[in-house]
Image: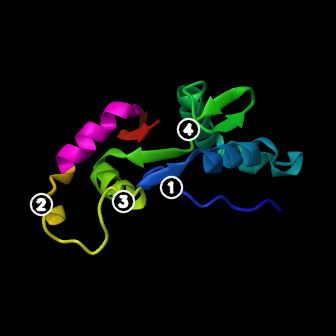
Amino acid sequence: MPAIINFSLIDDTLDVRDLIARVEELENLEPADEEEKWNNCDEFAALTAILDDLAGNGGDEQWRGDWYPITLIRNDYFTAYAQELADDIGAVPANVQWPMNCIDWDMAARDLKMDYASVEINGSTYWYR
């Protein structure tokens, strides 16, 4: 039995590899699972529509001849993502409060979004590059 892919289309971040794995899992259901195929028809259509929107937009994941961005960041999480990214790349010194606690992270996130494109998923905007 295939592994169950654990994600929700409302998560703060989505990994395109999980979406691809779920599409492949649905495609490979055995004929005996025909009822399950029909029960997942809407999910399959939604996931393939998302992947169609992302196909050829660059990124680090290749699937079926197209390149896809790996990480999708939900719009209302993007400010926290920008702050985590700044920490990860060393742009913000560790254990320093002032003036780092005075950074306008909403403005930093808006500036960072200039390097990102967006896609709509279930009525929410997700950012990727």
Which residue is labeled 3 in the image? 84
Determine whether the residue tagged by mark 4 lies in a helix, strand or loop. Answer: loop
Which residue is labeled 1 in the image? 8
Residue 30 is left or right of residue 35, and the answer is right
**CB contact under 8 Å: marks 1 and 2:** no
Percent position (x, y) of residue 55? 60, 27
Residues 106 and 125: in front is 106
Residues 87 and 79: in front is 87
Percent position (x, y) of residue 49? 56, 31
Percent position (x, y) of residue 45? 60, 35
**CB contact under 8 Å: marks 4 and 1:** no
Instruction: Report the Cα–Cα distance between label 2 and label 4.
Output: 32 Å
Instruction: Report the Cα–Cα distance between label 4 and label 1.
Output: 18 Å
Q: Earlier in the sequence, mark 2 or mark 3?
A: 3
Q: Residue at x 13, y 63 (%)?
A: 99
Task: Look at the picture and state if 74 lies above or below 67.
Answer: below
Q: Earlier in the sequence, mark 1 or mark 3?
A: 1
Q: Residue at x 33, y 55 (%)?
A: 91
